[in-house]
């Protein structure tokens, strides 16, 4: 048995005690993308500051200025932001992609890992058809970077994304809603 590479993605509105959950994820040493798309830059900075005081596994999303001001050397960006961003000084640069072509572009722009999705049906993308495992294989084959699958990932289907070439998985809703992050994490052991 080995631990699967797992990244958590936040959605604070799904979580009864968001900061407690961040602490749990930190204690499990799970990288956590702080993806709170409804917040403006000032609000996001305050949330990120508090999150960084609780967890050293936080990866800011979108707001490069927050990461720089808080001296966090990791950032995750939508591709359209990565296309014009100055990511110098970051040790880790993630990018969200939705096609093999976007994955190649992210790699050329300096991404160090990619999140590709959505792979399976998910409430987060209700009504949007999942891209599936063939899409994931194509993205993994297009780049020389670790690719993490997102979208409807569960302990039951996670092995199929690893078999498709992914380096790991990203989990949002399940981590945010779980009674215990540690118990859910154990279920991802393969």
Image (cartoon, rainbow, N blue to C red):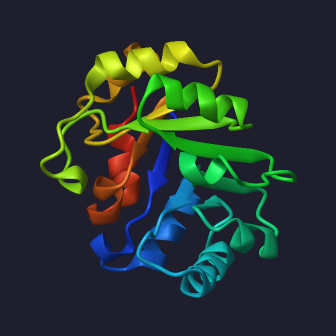
Residue 24's place in the image compared with 92, above or below, is below
Question: Could you tell whether 117 is left or right of 154 in the image?
Answer: right
- Residue placed most toward the observer, 161 or 41: 41
Q: Residue furthest front?
A: 84
Residue 36's place in the image compared with 107, above or below, is below
Can residue 71 be seen in this snapshot?
yes
Q: Position of residue 117 (x, y in %)?
A: 37, 37
Q: Position of residue 124 (x, y in %)?
A: 24, 55
Question: Could you tell whether 102 is left or right of 149 in the image?
Answer: right
Q: Residue furthest right?
A: 89
Residue drawn at the location 30% of the way across and 39% of the way down: 153
Image quadrant occupied by the C terminus:
top left
Q: Position of residue 34 (x, y in %)?
A: 53, 64
Q: How many discs mark residues in the rendered view?
A: 0
Residue drawn at the location 39% of the way across and 14% of the way down: 163
Question: Could you tell whether 146 is left or right of 87 in the image?
Answer: left
- Residue placed most toward the observer, 179 or 124: 124
Residue 59's place in the image compared with 105, above or below, is below
Residue drawn at the location 46% of the way across and 52% of the way down: 8
Residue drawn at the location 47% of the way across and 23% of the way down: 100
Residue 55's place in the image compared with 149, above or below, is below
Give the image quarter of residue 121.
top left
Can residue 2 be seen in this snapshot?
no
Image quadrant occupied by the N terminus:
top left
């Amino acid at each position: 048995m080995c631990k699967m590479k797992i990244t958590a993605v936040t959605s604070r509105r799904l979580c009864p005690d968001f900061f407690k959950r961040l602490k749990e994820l930190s204690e499990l040493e799970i990288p956590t993308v702080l993806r709170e798309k409804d917040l403006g830059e000032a609000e996001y900075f305050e949330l990120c500051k508090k999150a960084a005081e609780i967890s050293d596994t936080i990866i800011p999303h979108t707001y490069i200025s927050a990461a720089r001001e808080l001296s966090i050397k990791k950032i995750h960006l939508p591709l359209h932001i990565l296309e014009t961003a100055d990511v110098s000084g970051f040790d880790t640069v993630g990018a969200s992609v939705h096609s093999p072509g976007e994955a190649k572009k992210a790699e050329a722009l300096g991404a160090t890992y990619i999140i590709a999705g959505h792979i399976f049906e998910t409430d987060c993308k209700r009504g949007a058809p999942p891209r599936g495992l063939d899409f994931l294989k194509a993205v993994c084959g297009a780049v020389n970077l670790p690719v993490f699958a997102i979208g409807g990932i569960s302990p039951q289907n996670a092995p199929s994304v690893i078999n498709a070439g992914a380096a790991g998985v990203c989990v949002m809703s399940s981590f945010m809603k779980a009674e215990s992050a540690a118990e859910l994490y154990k279920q991802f052991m393969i």
